[in-house]
Image (cartoon, rainbow, N blue to C red):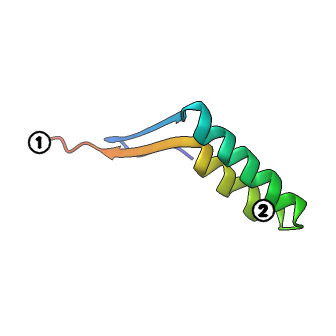
Amino acid sequence: MVPRTGVTVDICPRDLPIALIGTAGGALALWANAPAEIAVPVALLIALDIRVRRSRRRP
């Protein structure tokens, strides 16, 4: 997936406590037999800080 021109996607890990919470939540969901297709992306959304910015260029 390639973002369009003018769109910036920043992905960086969150601080340690929230990353541990995300990892623990994902492990708990997998332990409770939740499908991995749901548990892993949700854990990543909790553990990572994802920002999508759109910059408008004026001609």
Q: Which one is closest to the eye, mark 2 or mark 1?
A: 2
Tell which of 35 and 15 is nearer to you: 15
Left or right: 11 in relation to 8: right
Instruction: Pick out the residue farthest to the front.
Output: 17
Q: Can you name the residue that lies furthest to the left here?
A: 59
Query: Residue 56 at x, y = what percent?
Result: 20, 45
Q: Residue at x 78, y 62 (%)?
A: 37
On screen, residue 10 versus residue 35, left or right, reads left
- Residue under label 1: 58
Of the image marks 2 and 1, the number of the one nearer the N terminus: 2
Kind of residue at disc 2: Glu
In the image, 39 versus 31, the foreground residue is 31
Relative to 59, does residue 16 appear above or below in the rendering?
above
The residue carrying pointer 1 sits among few (fewer than 14), some (14 to 19) or many (20 or more) residues within 10 Å by Cα, namely few
Where, by quadrant of the figure, is residue 28 drawn? bottom right
- Image spot of residue 13 (x, y percent): 57, 33
**Element carrying mark 2:** helix
Does 5 sit left or right of 44 as displayed? Answer: left
Disc 1 marks a residue whose amino acid type is Arg
Which disc is residue 48 wearing? none
| Image coords of residue 16 (percent x, y) | 60, 31
**Which quadrant is home to the C terminus?**
top left
Q: Which residue is mark 2?
A: 37
Q: Give the spatial CA distance, label 2 vs label 1.
A: 41 Å
* SS at badge 1: loop
- State the residue at coordinates (54%, 32%): 15
